[in-house]
Image (spheres, rainbow, N blue to C red):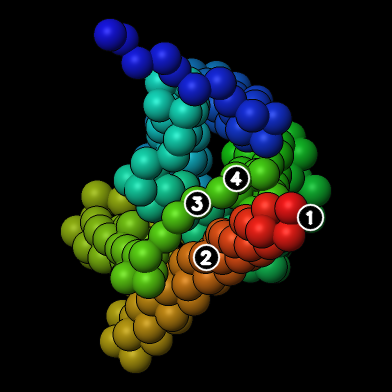
Amino acid sequence: MRKRKRQLDQRQQICLGLNLLIIFAELLGLYLRFYILGSPGLEYYTVLSNILTLVASSFMVYDLLAKGKIRHLTSVLRQLSVVMMTVTFAVVLFILPWNMNVALWKLLLPGQMFFLHLSCPLLSISTFFFAERHRFFNRDHRYSSIPTMIYAVLILALNYAGVVVGPYPFITKIVHQNNLRDMVAAAVICYFVTTGLGSLCIWYHRSKMQKIYDKRANAKELREGNLHKA
């Protein structure tokens, strides 16, 4: 006999709707990037973080519609995408304006930047923390730095090989100065920032799930106590 698919509750329906909105915004932003500007821009951390967010939200939609629950793999992908999106948003806000000597609004509002630099990061991060529920293991924080560290190693290697220039001014500066101390410092900062962000994501959701479990346990004890009294 075919197993009946469980209906999504209100919270899951909201989560589904928000992830569909993320997918739509990501597709629009990446379309503007890839086709209107005529360049994939895969050398940009921003583009890669948005692609990972698109993939992770697609997994979310599939899990909710096909399974009615979120797989651990999907939770890890969402956590990785949120870490990368947070780094992207922070770099756009606090580093690129003075590093590129450009007004902040020019990095947030025109064309594809409105989606890739502003709306998608904010929508993805807020959805992850306030609309989604994820179950994590303590060891999951180990994955947090992997995408960013791989990007850092590859982009520096490609710069030294002359395949890519930049694409960010601070990367070009590190390569041109050929300062080993600055490279090591940048790698260490990237590792601890991304690991810290990943640990924060995991701690938040584990704490939230623990409160839900405690609330259910208390409600169960209360019901059993009422039954005994009856």
**Residue wearing tag 4:** 132
Mark 4 and 2 residues: CB-CB less than 8 Å, in contact?
no
Q: CA distance from mark 4 to mark 2?
A: 12 Å
**Residue wearing tag 1:** 103
Residue 20 sits above or below residue 44 on the image: above
Left or right for 118, reference 198: right
Amino acid type, callout 4: Glu
Residue drawn at (56%, 21%) of the image: 7
Sequence-wise, which precedes: disc 4 or disc 2?
4
**Residue wearing tag 3:** 134
Residue lying furthest left = 161
Give the total of numbered labels.
4
Sequence-wise, which precedes: disc 2 or disc 3?
3
Badge 2: residue crowd in 10 Å (few <14, some 14–19, many ≥20) = some
Amino acid type, callout 3: His
Quadrant the N terminus occupies: top left
Please say whether residue 115 is visible from this viewpoint: no
Left or right for 5, reference 92: left
Report helix, strand or loop for mark 2.
helix
**Residue wearing tag 2:** 206
